[in-house]
Amino acid sequence: MKVLIADKFEQGGLDGLKSAGCDVVYQPDLEDATLADAIRDTAADVLIVRSTAVTSAMLEEGALSLVVRAGAGYNTIDVAAASKRGIYVSNCPGKNAIAVAELAFALLLALDRRVPDNVADLRLGKWNKKEYSKARGVFGRTLGLLGYGNIGQEMAKRAHAFGMPIVVWSRRFSTGKADASAEPIPMHVAATPQDLAERCHVLSVHLALNAETKGLVNASVLDKLKPGSFFINTARAEVVDYAALERVAREKNVRVALDVFAAEPTAATGEFKDAIASLQNVYGTHHIGASTDQAQEAIAAETVRIVATYKDTGKVPNVVNLATKTPATHMLVVRHRDRPGVLAHVFDHLRVENLNVQETENVIFEGAQAAVARINLDGEPSGALLKAIYRGNSDILDLHVVTL
């Protein structure tokens, strides 16, 4: 299996892929046209990327069957285009959670103690103990977590250790899929993001970016923040209305810490201008949340596991673009002798009525003499078709239809 790696990747990951029997092509500076050319010229089966964009046009090239995002978010990959071509997209969720939570909590403490301003003045030869002694402390202050996935949970552990009460808004709680009282960290649940912002002293964003969360943290949420409160975003810039955030930073003296910005340079280094970053009450880092050695090693190991599993079994761990519900309306259940040609006979007859197979499973009984096939269809087979299937092959023992 040929694997093309188009971003910086840990040496341990490169070694792991080679040990798994993969033919590795490591070209970490590929992007745009050069990446499309490499996909075509290498005829790679698997593409591994970190921040590099993977477009529909690129997916049309070559023979890719799997794209792995060596990280958690996969918004830089055209997942819809991959799905149309039957290309798996997989990611490495949770492997950078501790790293991002560590940065978010470091930013929280930096906001309280104004650490960057302290450092800046000291470097200028200024001593100002009177000014920088002004700090509230974080003990007893309420942390609001907007999102409670892997990173939010790691953030909660650290806040709890610092004696901070925790309030959470997450769809897993608001939809009843999870019970906050069963969580290991004591917390309260907010009814809405607006309710969360109103109840906390520190609002930290840990939402994945999707159609439902894009722009979710808008003026209706940010206007609920208390004057002088803290706002931290180490998730995605697109989930926050930065114009509204800049306004509340100016008007309500909300102290802001950001690891992500609306208009970041595409390269690792370059010029950067953003109005919100120039405010005195805004601290920023360079989109480095997941960039620790520990996180990158864990992500590399998970990437190797994904590729090796796919190579050895044909199954893809952490796949993100399989349908949760297909157009299937009926299941055809066929009990048959386990002999060649039985299922081919069934499928040939289904094609006569233009019935499309959405999913199929063939379960073998002990001794490999008999099996049951479960075939999900996008329509109901007629009685005449069922009779033709049953009578046309003596190895079919029984069949019936279940409405889904």
Image (tube, rainbow, N blue to C red):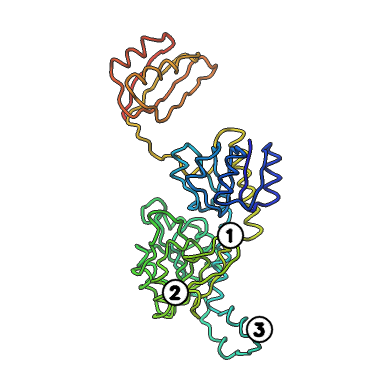
Circle 2 residue: 201
Whole-Å distance between the Cαs marked 1 and 2?
25 Å
**Secondary structure of residue under mark 2:** loop
Query: Disc 1 or disc 2, which is closer to the eye?
Result: 1
Quadrant in the rendering for residue 210: bottom left
Q: Earlier in the sequence, mark 1 or mark 2?
A: 2
Q: x, y (%) of residue 301?
A: 64, 48
| Residue neighbourhood size for the residue with mark 1, other residues' Cα within 10 Å, grouped as few (<14), some (14–19), many (≥20) | many
In the depicted structure, whether residue 219 falls above or below residue 23: below
Position of the N terminus, as image quadrant, is top right
Query: Disc 1 or disc 3, which is closer to the eye?
Result: 3
In the depicted structure, whether residue 72 falls above or below residue 352: below
Q: Earlier in the sequence, mark 3 or mark 2?
A: 3
Circle 3 residue: 123
In the depicted structure, whether residue 82 falls above or below residue 237: above
Q: x, y (%) of residue 106?
A: 57, 70
Q: x, y (%) of residue 403?
A: 31, 28
Circle 1 residue: 290
